Image (tube, rainbow, N blue to C red):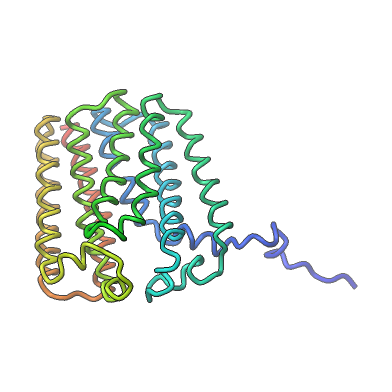
Amino acid sequence: MSTPVDSSSSVTPGIPWSALARLIRLQNQTGTYLLLLPTLWALILAARGVPPLHLLAIFLGGSFLMRSAGVIMNDLADQRFDRQVTRTKTRPLASGELSRRQAVILLSALLTLAACLLLLLPPIVTGLAPIAVLLAALYPYSKRWIHIPQAMLGIAFGWGTVMAWAAVQGKLDAQVWCLFGATAAWAVAYDTIYAVQDQDDDRHIGVKSAALYFGRFIHRGVGMAFGVMVAFLTAVGWLAQLGWPYYIALLGVVAFFMFQVYQLRKPITPVQAFDMFRAHVWVGTTLLIGLLGGLLI
């Protein structure tokens, strides 16, 4: 009598698919959306409307690949720290479920796929791409040196707007640098809120974060970052001569920012911090709709 074959183990045995999926946070794509949305702002603004579909597809795929690569770089750099943090100690690398070799192999595959996408873009974008990889690699280590490492994350995420603009226009001008500044400031704000989840552990192990740096004045630090973002976005609207729908969307975002700053005046729980962080996907979506409306009105 033949022994039944378990179909779940018959496909490429030995590859820990579940752990690899958790390594790149496949179950939680908030980070991908927060990287993608500003690139969509840049694509739409540079194209003065709906950009070519192939560019949308390339930057959608590129955002997923680079965010996935970025979190692997982060986990490789922070493996020792992650073991000491309640929220991260069960991550595949920190727990020992995956080896560093397995993580590096997946990282190499993701970066290779991202490089292949560059072949479909103008040479100027290819020239800008290594900076994106360098910024992603530096961010995890900035937690050792810089009191506000979220600024490095913001620069890394903002670089996506520069690449997207260059893909459409073939050059860089004032509008894209305003988008870059807005994106960088936005990342400082929402990632400071995200860092509230790990304040006690970070303080214990000596990792720096804006949440620790601002302390009881975190509402002021986040509020300042929001203010810088809004200033840059107002400049974008003026330079691009956008219509009233854009400013309506921006006013809605400002109201939301004021509410979050008010929430931060009192201590918040890790669960509240994560929910506040995830809500920023809707901020990016609102601004995207406002940009389209402001261009088409």
Q: Residue furthest front?
A: 145
The residue shown at (30%, 46%) is 157
- On the image, the x and y values in percent for residue 79 come to 45, 65
Q: Residue at x 54, y 53 (%)?
A: 104
> Which of the 4 quarters of the picture holds residue 222?
bottom left
Instruction: State the residue in front, 109 or 147.
Output: 147
Q: Is residue 81 left or right of residue 212?
A: right
Q: Where does residue 121 sit, x and y in percent of width and height?
A: 42, 28
Say if 11 sits above or below 270 in the image: above
Is residue 223 depicted above or below 184 in this figure? below
Number of residue marks: 0
Residue 84, image x, y percentages: 40, 75
- In the rendered image, which quarter is residue 213 located in? bottom left
Q: In the rendered view of the protein, which quadrant contains the C terminus?
A: top left
Q: Quick check: 172 left or right of 225?
A: right
The residue closer to the viewer here, 88 or 40, is 88
Residue 209, percent from left and from top:
25, 63
Q: Nearer the viewer, residue 171 or 239?
A: 171
Q: Quadrant of the N terminus?
A: bottom right
160 or 277: nearer the viewer: 160
Residue drawn at point x = 87 percent, y = 70 percent? 2
* Picture quadrant of residue 256: bottom left
Vertical position of residue 3 compared to residue 281: above or below: below
